[in-house]
Image: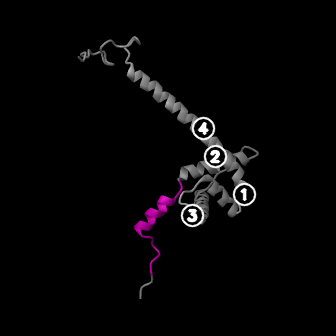
Amino acid sequence: METPTTTPTVVEKVVADAEELPKAIVKRVVKDKLSQLSQDGVDIQVLKDSLSAFSESARIFIHYLSATVNDICRESKRQTINAEDVFKALEEIEFPEFVSPLRASLEEFKQKNAKRKSDTSKAKEAKKSKIEEPLTDNGEAHENGDEDGNKVADEE
């Protein structure tokens, strides 16, 4: 009788790769935080296996938090997760100290996003008004022409 092999199949490998956090981002986050904590300004080296441990820990935390949020939504008979669900889940899994900074970060994100949307809509309006009134090279509107200065026949 054969014993089952522990070699992962191709499908398992693809799923595992899809769940991995981007190594460059994990490295940047870890190094940024370590530099903030360093009192003497020494650049701390992080070994590859340490980065893997950070990445795997973060992935597991995300899974745990996601499962808890999912349970909260199911109890409320909802299928859509909102920020309040995440805050409640953090408290349930005994990380209440994360809630306040996360709320502040979310509010800052919303404000930046609102400003970005406002700027984008203003730019679209400006572009739209330029399209409606084509200009010549000297900045004047074309008379009976398109934006390239080509004559356009008058419609009768």
Identified at 50% across, 60% down, the residue is 19
Label 2 or label 1, whichever comes before in sequence order? 1
**Does the stretch in magenta take in 13?**
yes
What amino acid is labelled 4 in the image? Answer: Lys
- Secondary structure at numbered mark 1: helix
Identified at 51% across, 28% down, the residue is 122
Q: Disc 4 marks which residue?
A: 112
Label 2 or label 4, whichever comes before in sequence order? 2
Rendered position, 152 above or below 73: above
Which residue is the extreme one toward the right?
39
Label 3 or label 4, whichever comes before in sequence order? 3
| Magenta span of residues | 4-21
Q: Disc 3 marks which residue?
A: 77
CB under 8 Å between discs 3 and 2: no
| Residues at marks 3 and 1, CA–CA distance in whole angstroms | 24 Å
Image x and y of residue 7, in percent: 45, 72
